[in-house]
């Protein structure tokens, strides 16, 4: 295994960018030279004729690095599945190019966090999925799950698919846990931990505010938890 971690979600909108950014912030705070990467971003904004990945910009800010072409190799215009967005932009996503960017980042940093797009089964190009990219980069997986009804099924399916494709799953983080959880939210983390074959490494709060402020608070809460050293050891082993 390379010195890195691939972060995926059980669905779109689960907050994996915030989790990845908060982990980058936490790793940086404990003295690890951490790099970040968002290989493919769809739904990018345009500025001065250039497509910008807000997700990659946030990750780079959290890690304290420049958001260059290695951090965000593919920026696509439409907020749709990357394979379709790339086709509309006349772009073919090349795993070789992504791997070259990752290798350059790995040479500059002690550890690299790579954030995917959506979940493992999201198509990228020519029938290849996010899961195929994880395997190509030879990285273990962190799964970010939502807390509400349906998450047990999505989480178990994600971990099962990863295992079937011989991808090592380091653990699951249940994100955006509400201040006033219902019955489904209160029982989800335990069920996920019991059924996924991977440990639940945290239940992170749903916090309001601007992205940078939320990342700072999440990183601070994580570092204040008594088990944070053990969790970081699991994620970076």
Image: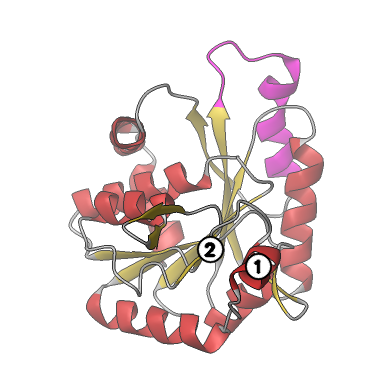
In the picture as drawn, the residue positioned furthest to the top comes out as: 180
- Specify whether residue 90 is painted magenta: no
Q: Identify the residue under disc 1.
A: 88
Q: Identify the residue under disc 2.
A: 76
Q: Nearer the viewer, residue 217 or 97?
A: 97
The image position of residue 123, as x and y in percent, is 72, 67
Boundaries of the magenta span = 177-194
Q: Is residue 1 found left or right of 68 in the rendered image?
A: right
Q: Nearer the viewer, residue 115 or 25?
A: 115
Secondary element at tag 1? helix
Q: Is residue 127 found left or right of 169 in the rendered image?
A: right
Secondary element at tag 2? loop
Residue at image point 39% right, 75% down: 3
The image position of residue 52, as x and y in percent, is 39, 57
- Specify whether residue 184 is painted magenta: yes
Residue at image point 61% right, 76% down: 90
The image shows residue 131, relative to residue 78, as above or below, that is below
The image position of residue 8, as x and y in percent, is 59, 56
Q: Are marks 1 and 2 in contact (CB under 8 Å)?
A: yes
The image shows residue 131, relative to residue 223, as above or below, that is below
């Amino acid at each position: 295994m390379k010195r890195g971690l691939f972060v995926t979600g059980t669905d779109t909108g689960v907050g994996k960018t915030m989790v990845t950014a908060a982990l980058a912030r936490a790793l940086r705070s404990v003295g690890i030279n951490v790099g970040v990467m968002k290989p493919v971003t769809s739904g990018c904004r345009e500025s001065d004729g250039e497509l910008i990945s807000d997700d990659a910009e946030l990750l780079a800010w959290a890690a304290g690095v420049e958001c260059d072409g290695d951090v965000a190799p593919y920026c696509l215009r439409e907020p749709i599945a990357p394979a379709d967005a790339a086709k509309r932009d006349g772009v073919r996503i090349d795993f070789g190019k992504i791997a070259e960017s990752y290798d350059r980042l790995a040479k500059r940093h002690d550890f690299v966090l790579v954030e995917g797009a959506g979940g493992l089964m999201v198509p990228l190009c020519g029938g290849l999925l996010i899961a195929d990219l994880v395997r190509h980069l030879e990285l273990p997986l962190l799964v970010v799950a939502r807390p509400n009804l349906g998450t047990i099924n999505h989480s178990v399916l994600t971990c099962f698919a990863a295992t079937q494709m011989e991808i090592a799953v380091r653990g699951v983080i249940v994100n955006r846990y509400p201040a006033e959880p219902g019955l489904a939210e209160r029982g989800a983390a335990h069920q996920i931990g019991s059924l996924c074959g991977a440990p639940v490494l945290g239940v992170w709060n749903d916090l309001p505010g601007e992205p940078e402020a939320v990342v700072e608070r999440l990183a601070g809460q994580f570092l204040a938890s008594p088990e944070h050293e053990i969790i970081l050891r699991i994620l970076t082993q």
